[in-house]
Image: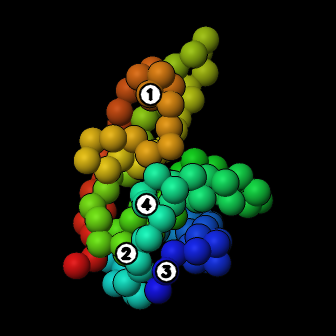
Amino acid sequence: MRIGVIEVVRTLWHVDRKLRREGFDATRQALQRDNSTRLWNTGGIDALARDVHRYGRFWPGSACLHQALALASLIRRSGMDCELVLGAERDRGIVMAHAWIECDGRALDESGERLAKLAILARFLFEGVR
């Protein structure tokens, strides 16, 4: 199955529903084990990241964690490895957290300047479906 708008939106919906019902750990583990339909990413990984962020912005309640988990799931099902990275920074007494995806050590659709300010808290490997 080719990754298109419908698959991106379906994955965002699935992630949102699972996060609300079961929390982060259960959602992450389920997505890391998901062996459903193998996807064919013909548009490239950067285009896929842009699509997830583009449609994720309009998803009610969607945050960077929702979008990162959806992107990790789509990349994994495309047969590629990636990492979900969680980071945080403290700015004027307020802790700001962020989630993003890296492939081969490169952050997808993210500003390097923004990420440089964050302390990495955790990394989770999503191995591609072979």
Q: Are marks 2 and 1 in contact (CB under 8 Å)?
A: no
Say whether disc 2 or disc 4 marks the residue closer to the N-terminus. 4
Q: Position of residue 99 (x, y in %)?
A: 48, 44
Amino acid of disc 2: Arg
Do we see residue 21 in this rendering? no
Q: Which residue is mark 4?
A: 44
Question: Which quarter of the picture shows residue 108?
Answer: top left
Q: Dot 1, how many residues are within 10 Å of its Cα: few (below 14), some (14-19), or many (20+)?
A: few
Q: Which residue is mark 3?
A: 2
Say whether disc 1 or disc 3 marks the residue closer to the N-terminus. 3
- Which numbered tag is attached to residue 77? 2
Which-is-in-front pick, marks 1 and 4? 4
Q: Are marks 4 and 3 in contact (CB under 8 Å)?
A: no
Give the SS element for disc 3: loop
Q: Is residue 14 above or below residue 96?
A: below
Amino acid of disc 1: Gly
Distance CA(mark 1)–CA(mark 4):
20 Å
Side of 112 where 20 appears, left or right: right
> What colour scheme has been applied to the protein in the rendered image?
rainbow
Q: Dot 2, how many residues are within 10 Å of its Cα: few (below 14), some (14-19), or many (20+)?
A: many
Which-is-in-front pick, marks 2 and 4? 4
Q: Is residue 55 above or below residue 113?
A: below
